Image (cartoon, grey):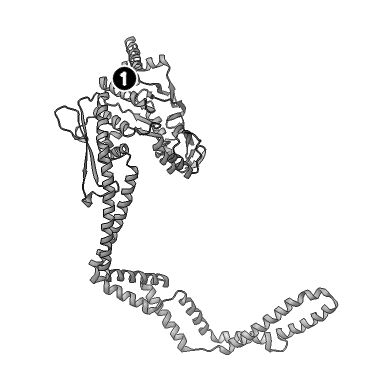
Amino acid sequence: MLSFLRIENIALINSIEAEFGPGLNLLTGETGSGKSIIVDSLAALTGERVSTDLIKEGERSARIEGVFSINGTHEVRQIFEEAGVELESGSEAEIVIRRDLSLAGKNRVFVNDQLVAAAFLKKIGPLLVDIHGQGDQASLFETSSQLAMLDHFAQTGSLRENAAVCYAEWRSVCEELKTLKSDEAEKLQLVDILRFQVDEIRRADLRSGESDELEDEKRRLNNIEKLSLLSSQAFSLLYEMDGSAVSTLGQAVDRIRQLGEYDDRFKDYFEGLDAATAVLEDVSITLRDYQNNLEFSPERLEAIESRLAEIARVTRKYGGTVETAIEHHARSEARLSNIETAELCEKELNTELARRRKSYLDAAAALNEKRRAAAGRFVKQIETNFKDVALEKARFEVRIDNGDDESRFGPDGSDRVEFFFTANPGESPKPMAKVASGGEASRLMLILKSVSNQQNGSKTSVFDEIDAGIGGRVAEAVGMKLKRLAAAQQVLCVTHQAQVASKADHHFVVEKSMGKRSTSITIRQLDDAERIEEIARMLAGEKITDAARENAREMIASAGKR
């Protein structure tokens, strides 16, 4: 249930707040006063997208905040725990949702002062509020919406999830088989090409890093004279010539050791000097061996050039690098194997496809059974409610068409569900889109939504001008239906009908005031005297008469007696 709503700097609103109560909460006001802005702001708290264009002109930021109570069931608590949001203990938990908008683009969502992702708000929004706008009437005529309503009433959630999983698995095998058959159809064209590519890359015997190794060896062979001179000079300086580094270092080490016999501070250097001597002797031996083994080989240089050219030729054809050529080789081998073993693979896939198809059909059958079992109860409850909205003679049917034709398969089963309706005795029911007028559609939506959503009494139902296009006795009937629905759950309704407004448990008026330089919207709850004036205005128009006031009193009194 929604208990409090605050809106700041949205559209024409500077700052408004309202406390809503249980039962029927009615919002009235002149056309264009801003009632729909309030509904849209509430929708933003349930996860609907909201644009920074809604920020009031001249302001840099905006805020929408609402306080809700929710059933603290195990499933609900699990959703909150997964998001890291604390939920107070008890069967009823209060949560505070806030959306902050900024022209700087830093839009944030908070639940119980915990920063959350917008996706979390989208997840919990349907648990809090169910908003039915004027545009919902069009969706009412779509068979997908009708299927969703029946499933909501039948509580097929787990069965739908299972059907969706089975459908995805069946589709996956279908795609594998399709790819296999495509390869088989191209077999004659592909097999020679693939074999040539596999053989060519295999003969090249590519190895990662080989090109770098060959380039290093090529560089050494091309600089053999320089390498010989440098290694000879280095060996001579270090070891061979008079006064070489090894010789002079040895003499210096001998002197330092003698010093150490008289002064201990020099002993600390003995180990380092020994290591330095060993390093110089080791590198000297390495230089000598390196020089002796240097040999220029034109044949080896030619072999390197040839190998590098072969690597460049093959890699240029298959991706530009040794790694991409090796990957291409693996893919080509796999595809060639797939084509060559297509008959065996196809047999295995067909077996798997049949198994997956049966699993899906079993899941779809369970879903169909649940829907058919619920359809009768759904129809009965719908027709029971017809009298409440002045549709006493109307008839309603739910037709479920099921089949195992694969063209009917889908993630929500293989059923085709459609609602049929007639408001006139003697006429057979027809698809709702073909027979329901605007006023009838409004009443049908009220009934369908209330019946399909009746399992969640803690949820707030919001109706934005659902009574548009009706009046008189029908408006009275719709008002009574809203009143009865509000006995089981909180209802928030925007209306222009006095007959509906007279049924309110809590009546709010939305007003727009225009100054010389600004326009603002306010909302306030009406007391008994103000309610009479507002309903009289709805009845009489701009000029309120005493007769209109008396009529308003009678309507309010009559609504209170029912």
Where, quadrant-wise, is the N terminus in this rendering?
Answer: top left
Q: Which of 499 and 79 is in front in this view?
A: 79
What is the three-letter code of the residue carrying label 1?
A: Gln
Which residue lies at the image location 25% right of the left edge and 31% below the top edge? 380
Where, quadrant-wise, is the C terminus in this rendering?
Answer: top left
Residue 189 location, quadrant: bottom left
Q: Nearer the viewer, residue 479 or 243?
A: 479
x and y percentages locating residue 114 in the rendered image? 51, 40
Q: What element carries label 1?
A: helix
Asked whether residue 136 appears in the rendered view, the answer is yes
Q: How crowded is mark 1: few (under 14 residues within 10 Å), some or many (20 or more)?
A: many
- For label 1, the residue is 499
Above or below for 5 versus 224: above
User: In the orientation shown, which residue stands out farthest toward the right?
Assistant: 262
Residue 290 location, quadrant: bottom right
Query: What is the number of callouts on the image?
Result: 1
x and y percentages locating residue 370 in the rendered image? 28, 41
x and y percentages locating residue 436 in the rendered image? 21, 31
Residue 357 location, quadrant: bottom left
Asked whether residue 178 appears in the rendered view, the answer is no
